[in-house]
Image (spheres, helix red, strand yellow):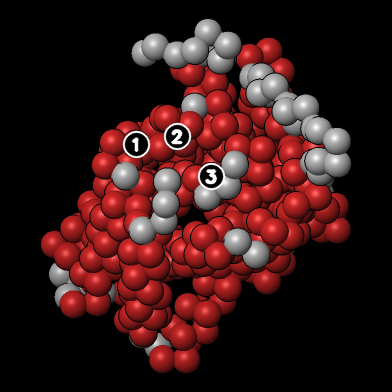
Amino acid sequence: MSQAPSRPNIIVMTLCGMFTSMVVIAFARLAFGLILPPMRADLGLDYQQAGLLGTVTALGYLCFVLVGGIAAARWGARFTIVFGLVSVAAGFAGLSIASTYPVLLMLMTLLGFGTAFSFAPMVALLATWYPERRGLVIGCMTSGVGLGTLLVGLLVPLLYGWFGDSGWRMSWGSFAVAAMTVAVLVILFVRDPARPVLGDGEKPPSADKWQIYRNPRVLTVAVVYGIIGMTYIVQTIFMVSFMVESGHAESTAGRYVALMGVLSLAAGPLWGWLSDRWGRGNALTASMTLVTLAMALPLASQTLLTFFLHFLLMGFSVNGMFALIQASATDQVAPRYIPIAFSFVTVFFAAGQLVGPALAGGLIDLTGNFRFAFGLTFAVLAVGVYLTLRIRRFPV
């Protein structure tokens, strides 16, 4: 692949992005569900306390993601990413030895804080360096989440087998080593683009942040990203339970989830590559339409075939949907404003992830039926598809 000599190697930079998303999303956010049962039993936590630990991580991310974007615009993405990774590593290391609940809350919040300073600036950095392959490089970065999820599924049970009741502590410790390793890789191989020299009276990017926040194109992308965050987390938390409640085996549901994870590894790069050639809006509309169709299938019928098709379509399209909305966010502003714009739209995503489980869980408790919750999810996704049609008409 030809590239300008002034740019860093695209493969090395993309690998650093993959490893960053693996640490701050798969390890810091998604692994908690697998580590929680033995951790809860060992520390004597009730389910309310355990649920709050997951909530404070999301809150830490939501509260600081804008700050992370502004920091990247002011001091450089590389410094900000390393700072975030070191913060996440400190959180992992603390969790490997902590035993008191207040300390656990503080450390889980630190994971969200560190993620806010790592993920969005890395996406912005890749988009700035490789604008003509923006979809592909962001798609490859999102595949790191799928890779990390697979590694967690293999590593954590293995550590339980080796270390027994201390296996959950060793899991957090292993994540700390991984986070520090990735921080070193970022220091060695990641570079910031040259900063434009400000002319007389010209303001730095952070001074124009309110103009970015009011930009109607940025706001449209932000709402769609919020819809994706809300609906994806509902699917992640409740779809397996819906399948089991419909009379199907948990082991079968687990295999379907694994199938979705394996497919998602290739989905991000594939959809990103397609969007670079077909158009971001066209590809985003197609991928989000497939996700909406996948969500409709279990509503129409709860057979094993419809659940299989649901997870098949989700695996094929959901990571692409993530990559494309993230790339779309970087398309709406000049390169110097990308860290701020992407952090802003990520606030909507994080808010959707907070609202979605509470709303869906309340509907399930109220009605005693999963169909109402997923019916709402389908309706919200349909609104998202309509908004992607507007994104298709945005000027390049």
Q: Residues within 10 Å of mark 3 (few under 14, many from 20)?
A: many
209 to the left or right of 351? right
Where is residue 305 shown, x and y percent of the image?
13, 62
In the depicted structure, whether residue 380 falls above or below residue 120 = below
Q: Nearer the viewer, residue 118 or 149?
A: 118
In the depicted structure, whether residue 346 falls above or below residue 271 = below
179 to the left or right of 388? right
Q: CA distance from mark 2 to mark 3?
A: 9 Å
* Residue 330 numbered tag: 3
Where is residue 377 shown, x and y percent of the image?
39, 74
The residue singled out by tag 2 in the image is 134
Q: Nearer the viewer, residue 62 or 107?
A: 62
User: Could you tell me if the residues under marks 2 and 1 are in contact, i.e. CB atoms within 8 Å?
Assistant: yes
Q: CA distance from mark 2 to mark 1?
A: 7 Å
User: Could you tell me if the residues under marks 2 and 3 are in contact, i.e. CB atoms within 8 Å?
Assistant: yes
Residue at x 49% of width, y 27% of height: 130
Q: Is residue 153 visible?
A: no
Q: CA distance from mark 1 to mark 3?
A: 13 Å
